[in-house]
Image: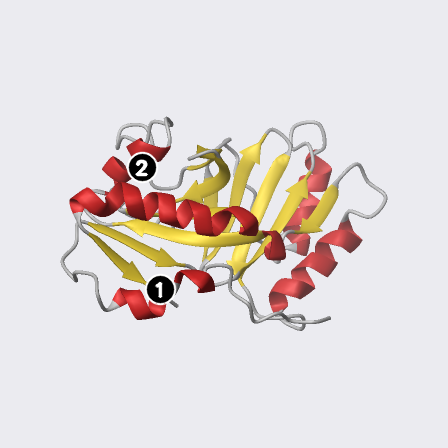
Amino acid sequence: MVELNYRPLSPLALSARAGKTPNTANVLLWELPKRRMLTLRLDPVAAPELVARAEEAMGGMKLPTKPNTMTAYTSDSYVLWMSPDEFMIDMPYEGPNGSDAAMMQALTSALAGEFALVADVSDQMAGIGLGGDLWREVWSKVCALDIHDSVFKPGDCAQTVAAKANIVFYGPDASADRVDHVRLYTRRSFSQYLFMRLEDAALEYGVSLKAL
């Protein structure tokens, strides 16, 4: 398996530009490292036995029991319930021989021959971090989805469209009192456009850029 070092946001020269942005900005925008992202499709209501098999294959990680929420685990790992029969497993990327790759193999074996699907979408996706005191104001410029504190709470996640790009997003600190930053994942081919759109939306508030 060939491991590609190319990062989709490299053409934006974030490393060079980061030092030219204010450290006390109201909006923070940064590039996220590559993650292991697995799509798991099964019906948790009609096939609870498959849920049990999947959770065993994941080493005890549990699927969320409420739609549009996530379960968080140590080592910065999460399981997101994205749609009635779709979950996303998001964890640190360790390469082709890591425990994250082994989980893909374990899930595939556990669900073989069943009405279920496991797919590695790591190379499809690119991640952007959005935070700061006024990140919600920036969000409101690119997406109509309500993320007020009373609606979008720690432990919630969603699939939606932001600036015409399909995204998955969540706040990684599920134990916090409120969501103070989010991770946005979109297709690699949309990532540069989405980053620039968010940066443009944040300019009036003061934006600080960070690179890997």
Is residue 66 at least partly visible in the picture? yes
* Image location (x, y in percent) of residue 175: 32, 48
* Image location (x, y in percent) of residue 42: 69, 36
Work out which residue is located at the far right of the displayed protein and give it: 113
In the picture, the quarter occupied by the N terminus is bottom right
Amino acid type, residue under disc 2 in the picture: Trp
Q: Is residue 155 above or below residue 25?
A: above
The residue located at (72%, 38%) in the rendering is 49
Residue beneath label 2, please? 139
Instruction: Give the left or right position of residue 41, taking residue 36 as reference.
Output: right
Q: Are marks 1 and 2 in contact (CB under 8 Å)?
A: no
* Nearer the observer, 93 or 161: 161
Q: Nearer the viewer, mark 1 or mark 2?
A: 1
Which circle marks residue 163 in the picture? Answer: none
Amino acid type, residue under disc 1 in the picture: Leu
Q: Nearer the N terminus, badge 1 or badge 2?
A: 1
Is residue 183 at least partly visible in the picture? no
Q: How many residues crowd mark 1 within 10 Å: few (<14), some (14–19), many (20+)?
A: some
Which circle marks residue 14 in the picture? Answer: 1
The residue located at (49%, 41%) in the rendering is 168
Instruction: Give the left or right position of residue 120, taking residue 202 as reference.
Output: right
The quarter of the displayed image where residue 204 is located: top left
Report, in whole angstroms, how far the alpha carbon at label 1 lies from the one at label 2. 21 Å
The quarter of the displayed image where residue 88 is located: top right
